Amino acid sequence: MIRRWHGRELQSIREIARRTRMSRHANWKCLASGEMQQRCSRRQNTSTLDLYAEILSSWLGRESKRNCKRRSNLKQARGDLVALGFDGPYDRVAAIACERR
């Protein structure tokens, strides 16, 4: 793919780096080597919120049906998750809530 973009489509190394989310140096190494397959796969990160995602999803669904004045905010939802054993930061809870909206 990198060879095709660089050779046929005449894309710059910077543009290829943006598309592949690899560094420019890594792209140059791929072009210089004769290998056709990528050696490493993407790392799969697990979130500390994965264990509580179903609970948070049900809470968000319940809160979305409530009146605006009766809704609890995400800080309160994170406090409830901390009471259940969640030890992650607030921004992860906010990111998951933003994705589900």
Image: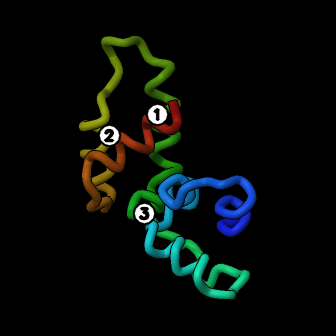
Q: Secondary structure at mark 3?
A: loop
Q: Which residue is mark 3?
A: 47
- Are the residues flagged by discs 1 and 3 in contact, CB closer than 8 Å? no
- Are the residues flagged by discs 1 and 2 in contact, CB closer than 8 Å? yes
Residue at (73%, 63%) from the top-left corner?
4
Q: Which residue is mark 1?
A: 60
Circle 3: residue type: Ser
Q: Which residue is mark 2?
A: 77
Residue 88 position in % (x across, y down): 28, 58
Quadrant of residue 5 within the rendered picture = bottom right
* Disc 2/disc 3 C-alpha distance (Å): 17 Å
Q: Nearer the viewer, mark 2 or mark 3?
A: 3
Label at residue 101: none
Using residue 19 as the reference point, say whether residue 80 is left or right of it: left
In this view, 35 is above or below 15: below
Q: Secondary structure at mark 2?
A: helix
* Mark closer to the chain start, 2 or 3: 3
